[in-house]
Amino acid sequence: AQTVTQSQPEMSVQEAETVTLSCTYDTSESNYYLFWYKQPPSRQMILVIRQEAYKQQNATENRFSVNFQKAAKSFSLKISDSQLGDTAMYFCAFMKGSGGSNYKLTFGKGTLLTVNP
Amino acid sequence: ETGVTQTPRHLVMGMTNKKSLKCEQHLGHNAMYWYKQSAKKPLELMFVYNFKEQTENNSVPSRFSPECPNSSHLFLHLHTLQPEDSALYLCASSPRTSGPDTQYFGPGTRLTVL
C-alpha cells in the first residue's frame, strides 16, 4: 500500500515571499502520478499541479513549482511570490499509474499554509 | 452551472434519520468518487463509480449506500449514522478516458450527526 506523509501540519509565510511545502511518499510502484491540491477555507479543493513519475523535468504552473526527487521519494511544492489568496490547506496525493487500480488517490494529512500581509 | 456541485452544503441529522447527499458533475466525466474528510486525518476514499458501475467499495459500513443512476449524478444515502460519521463528504469526478487522470472536487457537504 502507498503512504503519503506531509510532515508540516502548519506553515506561515509573508506576502511576496517564497515557501516550500514538503511531501514524501512510500511506494514500490515505478509508474505513478503525484498531485498537489489546494483547499481554501470553506471552498472547493482544486488541483494546483501534477507530476508524472516518468518525467524527469519538474512541473511548473505559474508561481507554483515542484521539486520531484524520485530516488528520495520526495515531492515538495514551492510557492513563489506568495499571495493572500494562497492561504489554504495543501494536500499532497499519490496515484498508481497502471494495473487496473481504479486510479485511486492516496492523500497526505495536509499542510495549512497561512500567508500574512 | 459548471464543475462539480453538491447539495446540501450543510446537513444535521439524528442517528435514526435517513438522508441523502447529492453530487452532480457538469464536466462530461465518466468516473465519480465519494471521499470522507475528517479533521486531522487524510481524505479517505469511500466509493468509485466508472460509467455508472461501482468499481470500488473501500470497506465502507452499510449505513452508507451509494447510488449512481448516470455518469453525471451520484448520491450517498445515509441511514442510522453514528456521531463519528460527522465529517465533510466530498464528491469528485474525472474523465476516465484512459489511464490516470485528474479528479475534480465538489465543495462538499458538512455532515453533523447528533
Image: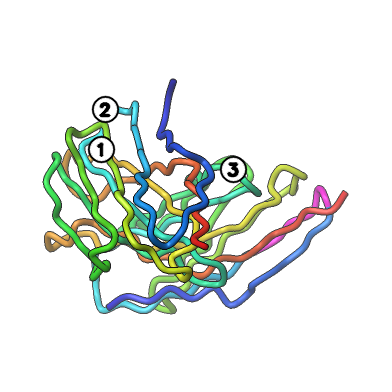
Residue B35 belongs to the span the image colors magenta = no
Task: Let me know if residue A58 appears in the view.
Answer: no
As drawn, A2 above or below A101: below
Q: Are marks 1 and 2 in contact (CB under 8 Å)?
A: yes
Which residue is depicted at the point 23% across and 70% down?
Answer: B59
Of residue A41 and residue A63, the one placed in the foreground of this image is: A41
Query: In front: A39, or B97?
Result: A39
Who's the residue at 39% across and 71% down the image? A70
Q: Position of residue B43 (x, y in %)?
A: 43, 63
Q: Residue at x 50, y 65 (%)?
A: B38
Q: Quadrant of residue A56?
A: bottom left
Residue under label 3 = A43
Bin the neighbour count of mark 2 within 10 Å (Cα to Cα): few under 14, some 14-19, many 20 and up. few
Amino acid type, mark 1: Pro
N-terminal-most mark, 1 or 2: 2
Residue B70: percent from left, percent from top: 18, 33
In the current view of this chain or complex, which residue is farthest to the front?
B16
Looking at the picture, how far across and down is residue A91, in whole percent? 52, 60
Looking at the image, residue B28 sits to the left or right of residue A80; the answer is left
The part of the chain drawn in magenta is: A15-20
Residue type, numbered disc 3: Arg
Give how far across and how far down residue A72 sits, in percent. Answer: 44, 79
Q: Element type at marker 2?
A: loop
